[in-house]
Amino acid sequence: MLLYAAKSLECIVMNKATHPTSTIETLNYAQRERLIFIEFRLYFLGDVGRQDLMQRFGIAPAVATRDFAHYRELFPNNIDFDNKSKSYVIGQAFSPAFQHSSERVLTALSRGFGDGIGGSSDPLLMCELPIVLNQPSTEILAPITRAIHQQKIVSIDYTSHSSGFSTREIAPHALVNDGLRWHVRAYDRKRLDFLDFVITRIPRSQFVEAGRVLPHEQHNADIQWNRIVELDLVPHPSQEHPEIIENDYGMISGVVHLKLRAAVAGYVLRQWIVDCSSAHSMQGKEYRLWLRNHLALYGVSSAKFAPGYEFPEV
């Protein structure tokens, strides 16, 4: 779960004409984080009280009082005090002093604040989220993430559709989420190639302390990972109202231009249900997009997951 306020600190933008930056810069990191939280509540919920600040950051009432005083001093037009509710409310001339990432805002509103440790907070608004498939076990995940960070080897048991159960050593270098499940991208010493392993198919993982990742097993040797493919997605020709799709996907001049790693491109195209056939021949209302430049997938290993894509005959 994302820590909204902390992650937003690098995005601070202020109106220098009315808010001197020297004042805000005198605050420490924790104080700035709390001011961002105050503004977040004002901007997206319309009110904020001392108790909100105290519960979120575990601070004393006196500290919360000073934080509100700081915010009111810096941005007086953004905040008013409502005597009836005894809380602060959004000012009539409110203008955000900080940039707020839409993705992080929606995460905070739908999942609450938190750092993912010790449980999660309640959502701030009623929200319905898609069902998540089986999550990886932390006991399996931890040796893998340690190995990524320390560039070490992991011994795993793995079950695949093609080869069944096997034990192998891998050199992991990245985690990948395809929208449905988590993978680990790793060099497989059994197959002698870089592959994606679904973490929930790993019943055992063991950190190999003495295991050293060799140069040809490192991420910079993973051609599919380092290759960037540029894909042009347009409204599917079968759709009756392409202008709606253009708005839904934020298209510019009728196209969404994506730059993706070759190793994950097929997953994205599958998740977005993109018709990747050369003649936009996939049928069904679910195909709202068509990959206009399907030749860009030539030599992309993950293209096998792209709906309708046909590998060229050799």
Image: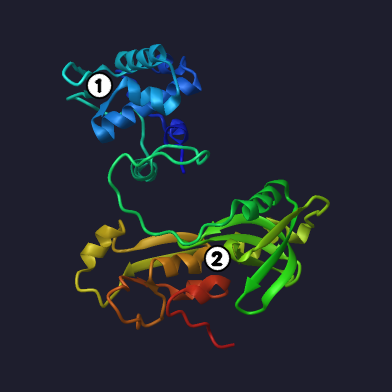
- For mark 1, give the secondary structure: strand
Q: State left or right for residue 74 relative to residue 133.
A: left
Sequence-first tag of 2 and 1: 1
Badge 2: residue crowd in 10 Å (few <14, some 14–19, many ≥20): many
| Residue ID at (62%, 53%) | 141
Please tell me which residue lies in front, 96 or 119: 119
Instruction: Tell me, yes or no, if residue 173 can be seen here.
Output: yes
Residue 313: which quarter of the image? bottom right
Judge depth for marks 2 and 1 and give the one in front. Answer: 1
If the image is split into quadrants, where does the C terminus sit? bottom right
Q: Name the residue carrying label 2.
A: 262
Q: Height in image: 69 above or below 116?
A: above
Badge 1: residue crowd in 10 Å (few <14, some 14–19, many ≥20): many
Please tell me which residue lies in front, 140 or 313: 140
Q: CA distance from mark 2 to mark 1?
A: 49 Å
Residue 290: which quarter of the image? bottom left
Q: Name the residue carrying label 1.
A: 88
Q: Position of residue 137 (x, y in %)?
A: 58, 55
- For mark 2, give the secondary structure: helix
Q: State left or right for residue 112 relative to residue 260.
A: left
Q: Position of residue 114 (x, y in %)?
A: 45, 37
| Residue ID at (49%, 23%) | 29
Residue 156: which quarter of the image? bottom right
Residue at the limit of the structure toward the bottom, as seen here: 313
What amino acid does circle 2 point to? Ala
What amino acid does circle 1 point to? Tyr
Q: Position of residue 47 (x, y in %)?
A: 25, 27
Q: State left or right for residue 168 relative to residue 73.
A: right
